[in-house]
Image: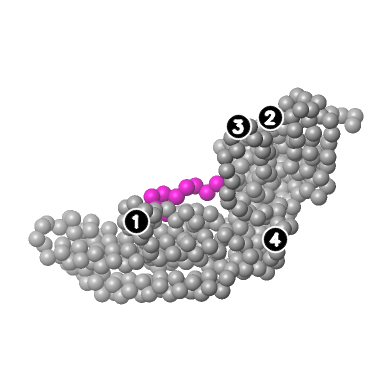
């Protein structure tokens, strides 16, 4: 207790502190103040590691407690302005680092890697001096859903990764620091890691189905739009014009079996393969234990439906599209060339349908040298 530094903790007032309670399991500190209630500092681990050596180093990656994947739940109600409710801890893995001065030169980058060394996510890094905290969502990228009349709400969020040991890597110019990041299950859950693995595998299987739907819709749209554009360039009455419009209509029939197209979205009640996929994805994501057997069967059903549509498109491409391309070449017009089947990856995307929201990777907090907590969502 020979050296002290002022701790403000965001909106914490200048008020007498009558008691301190250390929660050893989670490394939290509860502060009892005079007439103002209880204040909680989540995870003292980074503060305890902030010694003279760390404060004299240009960049230090500080340890944090294991990140717990808490049970997800929805609900709640409006408390009004007379209810005293504290904020929950950040819903993610907190990564802490210290820099004595503001980062000025070069890019400051934070990455999360899996056990094989693959980069899973890149997070925004605050350049402010002091202790900075970045929250990682512990999720895989969201599926790439095809565009439709409404957003596929469930697909806007990727599945939560399997608990285990990951690696945090912070890069500042030539300086590269790494540290382990441990993820654990919620202590209250009744399922084990094997069940979580089964749930994750099922969610990723549906995510890949979304990707294949997106790729097929892109090929169908290339035929539709290509045929419409070339038909519009021909003079009225040209026999090829009607043939191209017929090709576009046949392709559109296939598209409407994959995605909903009626304006009004959910109000219309129109549900197609993509909407059924999104419902299944949301159902699997709603419980992180082992998925039900009917859900696994449902995945196979939807996969077979898409396979059937893809086969019909291939036959359309081999017959009608090939014939129309021959006609276009004869008219000295460019043929219609849809992308190849593997042109779309099953990587990150969004909900589709008029633009998807950007993935929110994390929230950044900064603890300055005087320990005053401030929001620090800075952009490079």
Residue 294 horizontal/vertical position (percent): 53, 73
Q: Around disc 2, counting alpha carbons within 10 Å, would you say few (fewer than 14), some (14 to 19), or many (20 or more)?
A: few
Of labels 1 and 3, earlier in sequence is: 3
Q: Which is more foreground, mark 2 or mark 1? A: 1
Residue located beneath label 1 in the image? 268
Q: Around disc 4, counting alpha carbons within 10 Å, would you say few (fewer than 14), some (14 to 19), or many (20 or more)?
A: few
Of labels 2 and 4, earlier in sequence is: 2
Residue 239 horizontal/vertical position (percent): 12, 65
Tell me: 188 left or right of 289. right
Residue located beneath label 4 in the image? 189
Of labels 3 and 4, earlier in sequence is: 3
Span shown in magenta: 352-360
Q: Which is more foreground, mark 2 or mark 4? A: 4
Mark 1 → mark 3, Cα distance in angstroms: 39 Å
What residue is shown at x 56% (from left), y 37% (from top)? Answer: 379
Q: Quadrant of residue 127?
A: top right
Residue located beneath label 2 in the image? 11
């Amino acid at each position: 207790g020979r050296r002290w530094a002022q701790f403000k903790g965001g909106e914490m007032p200048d008020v007498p502190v009558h008691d301190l309670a250390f929660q050893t399991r989670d490394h939290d500190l509860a502060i009892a103040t005079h007439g103002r209630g209880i204040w909680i500092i989540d995870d003292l681990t980074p503060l305890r590691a902030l010694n003279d050596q760390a404060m004299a180093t240009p960049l230090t990656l500080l340890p944090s407690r294991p990140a717990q994947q808490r049970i997800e739940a929805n609900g709640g109600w409006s408390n009004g302005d007379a209810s005293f409710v504290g904020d929950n801890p950040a819903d993610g893995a907190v990564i802490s680092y210290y820099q004595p001065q503001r980062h000025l030169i070069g890019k400051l980058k934070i990455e999360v890697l899996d056990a094989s060394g693959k980069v899973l996510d890149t997070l925004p890094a605050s350049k402010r001096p002091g202790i900075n905290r970045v929250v990682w969502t512990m999720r895989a990228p969201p599926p790439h859903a095809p565009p439709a009349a409404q957003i596929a709400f469930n697909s806007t969020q990727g599945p939560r990764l399997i608990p285990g040991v990951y690696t945090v890597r912070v890069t500042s110019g030539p300086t590269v620091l790494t540290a382990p990041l441990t993820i654990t299950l919620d202590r209250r859950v009744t399922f084990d890691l094997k069940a979580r693995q089964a749930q994750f595998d099922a969610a990723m299987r549906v995510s890949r189905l979304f990707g294949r739907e997106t790729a097929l819709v892109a090929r169908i749209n290339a035929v539709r739009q290509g045929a419409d554009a070339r038909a519009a360039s021909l003079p009225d009455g040209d026999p090829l014009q009607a043939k191209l419009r017929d090709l576009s209509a046949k392709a559109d029939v296939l598209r409407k079996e994959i995605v909903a197209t009626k304006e009004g979205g959910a109000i219309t009640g129109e549900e197609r393969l993509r909407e059924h996929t999104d419902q299944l994805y949301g159902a699997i994501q709603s419980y992180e234990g082992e998925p039900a057997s009917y859900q696994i069967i449902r995945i196979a059903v939807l996969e077979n439906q898409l396979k059937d549509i893809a086969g019909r498109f291939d036959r359309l491409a081999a017959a009608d599209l090939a014939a129309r391309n021959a006609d276009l070449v004869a008219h000295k017009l460019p043929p219609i060339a849809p992308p190849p089947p593997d042109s779309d990856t099953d990587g990150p995307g969004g909900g589709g349908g008029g633009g998807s929201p950007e993935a929110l990777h994390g929230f950044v907090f900064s603890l300055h040298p005087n320990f005053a907590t401030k929001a620090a969502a800075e952009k490079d």
